[in-house]
Amino acid sequence: MDTILSQMYGTDKYHVNRNVRRPRRMIAALQTSERRSNLTRREQVIAAARELFLSKGFVHTSITDITDTVGGSRRDIYGMFTDKEGLFNAVLQSLIADVLSPSEMTFPARPGPDIAQDLRTFGKGLLANMLDPATVTIFRQFVSIGAARPEIGMQAYLSGPGVVYRRLATYLAAGASDGRLKIDDADRTARIFVEMLKGDYQLRALMTNETAFDRADLAEHVEKVVTLFLNGASPR
């Protein structure tokens, strides 16, 4: 028995003998378990930081605030995210994923048989997400952060609204190349269309906290925007 134990643990039974080869299945299981553990820990930190950033703001949230909430040490946080801005970037990606994840926001790369219907679906999904109370709160934080840290604000813009503009611009450019739309600048046209969709709804939500808009009114607004847009963008 002592011989077997010495082969497994070395001369000191409390220290692993690293020269003993472990079965491949055991190694794979340990590596998988470690990855899951790290992923779970990372998600916990992101979730805690997300709540604190939204409630206290980026500037007023410290790494100590986060470790007090989720446990661990500053070294743990820096090991996973390098610094506070790295953690913010991870939180930002989490927030953007929530805002852009609904099926209504999954915009096709090329127009389908009915361009008007594509744009209606996009418009309704955009307004629904934009006017969601959680999204309004996130947007307010981005504006606040951008005022103090323009470089972070730009990162938020490119990862959020910028993604929407690029998706729509790709779609419009494809429609123009097919001869179904008359557009000479897809990027600018995408921004114009989105701003038409916003109307005054987003400002009302941001400035008055009004988010319970009438669905029929929103649907009518989207319909008029799509009609007006296509009247100007359709080939003559």
Image (cartoon, helix red, strand yellow):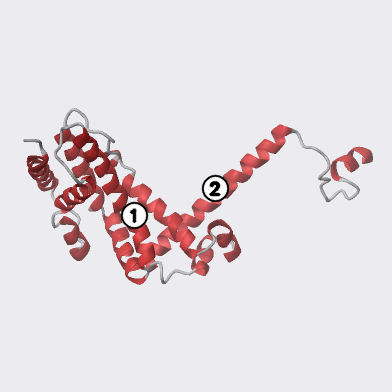
Q: 48 and 103: which one is in front?
A: 103
Q: Badge 2: how crowded within 10 Å, few (<14), some, or many (20+)?
A: few
Residue 162 at what x, y percent from top left? 30, 52
Q: Is residue 163 left or right of residue 24?
A: left
Q: Name the mark on residue 39.
A: 2
Q: Is residue 232 left or right of residue 110?
A: left
Q: Is residue 152 above or below residue 11?
A: below
Q: 75 and 182: which one is in front?
A: 182
Please identify, in this view, whether the residue under mark 2 or under mark 1 is nearer the observer.
Answer: 1
Q: Which residue sits at x=34%, y=61%?
A: 154
Is mark 2 in CB contact (under 8 Å) with mark 1?
no
User: Please, what secondary structure does the residue beneath circle 2 have?
Assistant: helix
- Residue 31's image quarter? top right
Residue type beneath disc 2: Leu
Q: Is residue 51 left or right of residue 186?
A: right
Circle 1 residue: 158
Quadrant where the N terminus sits is: top right
Residue type beneath disc 1: Leu
Q: Is residue 98 left or right of residue 181?
A: right
Residue 19 at what x, y percent from top left? 83, 42
Q: Is residue 57 above or below residue 173?
A: below
Q: Which mark is first along the chain, 1 or 2? A: 2
Separation (CA) of disc 2 from disc 1: 26 Å
User: Please, what secondary structure does the residue beneath circle 1 have?
Assistant: helix
Q: 37 and 152: which one is in front?
A: 152
- Residue 29's image quarter? top right
Q: Name the mark on residue 97.
A: none
Q: Which residue sits at x=24%, y=36%?
A: 174
Q: Which residue sits at x=41%, y=60%?
A: 51
Q: Which residue sits at x=13%, y=44%?
A: 222
Q: Badge 1: how crowded within 10 Å, few (<14), some, or many (20+)?
A: some
Specify the farthest residue to the top: 113
